[in-house]
Structures are given as C-alpha cells and as structure tokens.
Image (tube, grey):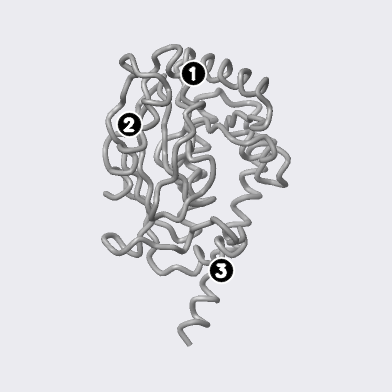
Amino acid sequence: MKRLRNALRAAGRAARLFGHIFKGLWIVALRFPQLSEERQHAHVQAWAMQLLAHAGVSLRIEGQPPRQGPVLLVSNHISWLDIPVLHAARHCRFISKSDVKAWPLIGTLATAAGTLYIERSSRRDARRMVQSMEESLQRREILAIFPEGTTGDGHRLLPFHANLLQAAVQIEAPVLPVGLRFTDGEAGPISRAPSYEGDETLLGSIWRTLCADELVAHVHYGQAQTPDGRDRRAWALDLHAEVDRLRQG
C-alpha cells in the first residue's frame, strides 16, 4: 500500500513538474524578450524554486550566497537536480558541455538561463571558453562550474579538473567553494534518490527523486578565495579540500 501511495504521489509530482517545464518555455519565448537581464535572472531563480517545490524537494542554505559578481562558484556534482538547486539559491551562469544545448526542452531553458557552452574535446574551444569566462567575470557576473567534470555518488568527491579555473587565475577573480548534499529529512542520512552516475539513468533518477518522502537539498557556501600566487593546479587541490569539507556539513 505504501509503495502504491508513493507511486501515485510521484505521478502527481511528475505531472506538475512537466507542466512547470512547459510554463518555463512559455516564459522564455514570450516574456524574456521584453525583460531586462536582471528581471530574467529573477524569473530563473523563482522558476527553479517552484521546480523544487513541485518535485517535493526542500532547500536549505548555509553560509552566505554571493550578492553580486565577479565570482566563480565551484561545487561538487551529484545529480541533474544540482543546477536548479543552485539557481534557486542564487542565480548564476553555468559552464556546461556543448551537447546540452541540443537537448529537447532542457537546452532551451539552459540557454535562456545564461549557460555558457564548451566543446570539451577541442583545445581551441577551451581557449575560447577561458576568454568568455574572463569577459563574464569582468562584467561582474556570477559563474558556476562542476570541476569534477561528471556526477559523483554523493559520498566520494572526484578529482577536480583545474583548467576551468584558468580564467579566475588570469584576472585574479574570487572563487567561492560550495558543498552540495541531499538528505532524507532535515538531519537525516545522505539520500541516494537524486544520484545520477555510472549506469544509472536520468529517468530513474527523476523517478526516485519524485518518490522520496522528505528530500532536502543543502547548499553550503564557504568563503571566497583569490589565487594568492597559486597556479590553477595548486588552487584546484585547495578548493577540492574545502568543497569536500562543506559538502559534509
């Protein structure tokens, strides 16, 4: 009986979630062209908050989100849910792999949210991305990266790819470490429901998330750092240690 109740609740959440996605597409197509960039960012943050509510996910913020840029957020990566969680906590522009742009529905929403795309296999495109990130930071924007390069299991932090820090090193922009975790209830154990790694499927991750009883997303902001003479590899190691600490609460 409990399994049936969970399935029925998840089905209701799924219907609201997909309705919310189409609402977002409508806003992007009809409202965004008339809005200032600041108002667009506010819409993205509000939309992300509503998405979490439709999915049955509560948000808890620890530390101080950045009020303005320039700043580069560096976070661990667990799930497809990480991006709306970070958007709900504070709008930012994500750096993402280029194929996301072509994803049905999601690509349109990601582009509208200000995502910058990179072709990871191209060195020339990597240089272009560094320049784009520098320009964004010089415009006092808030950028966000997942330097693990892929999703982890939520228990072990993968090594960081240091190349995405190059823009911050070159213009000495601050980097803000962020720790993400999902728990069963406010102070419960780490939840595997939203995980999306290895052989797990996106649909399976979404369904487990929608079936969860009291899923809580924790966003823990640390203290901003500047390179202080460190090269990107040394800085990546220090940031890895700090994100690892933050994600464990």
Q: Earlier in the sequence, mark 3 or mark 2?
A: 3
Return the residue at label 3: 12
Residue depicted at x 31% and y 38%: 241
SS of the residue at dot 3? Answer: helix
Q: Nearer the viewer, mark 1 or mark 3?
A: 1
The amino acid type found where label 1 is placed reads: Ala
Report which residue position mark 2 lands on.
238
Residue beneath the point at 51% across and 66% down: 208
**Image height of 219 relative to 173, above or below:** below
Q: Give the residue type at disc 2.
A: Asp
Q: Sequence-wise, which precedes: disc 1 or disc 3?
A: 3
Given contact means CB atoms under 8 Å apart, are the residues at marks 1 and 3 in contact?
A: no
Mark 3–mark 2 distance (CA, rounded to whole Å): 43 Å
For label 2, the crowd category at 10 Å Cα-Cα, with few meaning under 14, some 14 to 19 and many 20 or more, is some
Which residue lies at the image location 58% right of the left edge and 70% below the top edge? Answer: 11
- Is 95 on the left-hand or right-hand side of 111? left
Of tags 1 and 2, the one toward the viewer is 2
| Left or right position of 5 against 31 | left
Task: Specify the amino acid type for callout 3.
Answer: Gly
Labelled disc at residue 8? none
Q: Is residue 64 left or right of residue 168?
A: left
Please provide percent x and percent y for residue 178. 36, 38
In this picture, residue 222 sits left or right of residue 83: left
Q: CA distance from mark 1 to mark 2?
A: 17 Å
Q: Is residue 130 above or below residue 105?
A: above
Residue at figure coordinates x 38%, y 55% from the top left: 155
Q: Nearer the viewer, residue 223 or 105?
A: 223
Relative image position of residue 230 (x, y in whole percent): 35, 18
Which label sits on residue 167? 1
**Place of residue 116 in the rendered image (x, y in percent of width and height, measured from the top left):** 60, 28
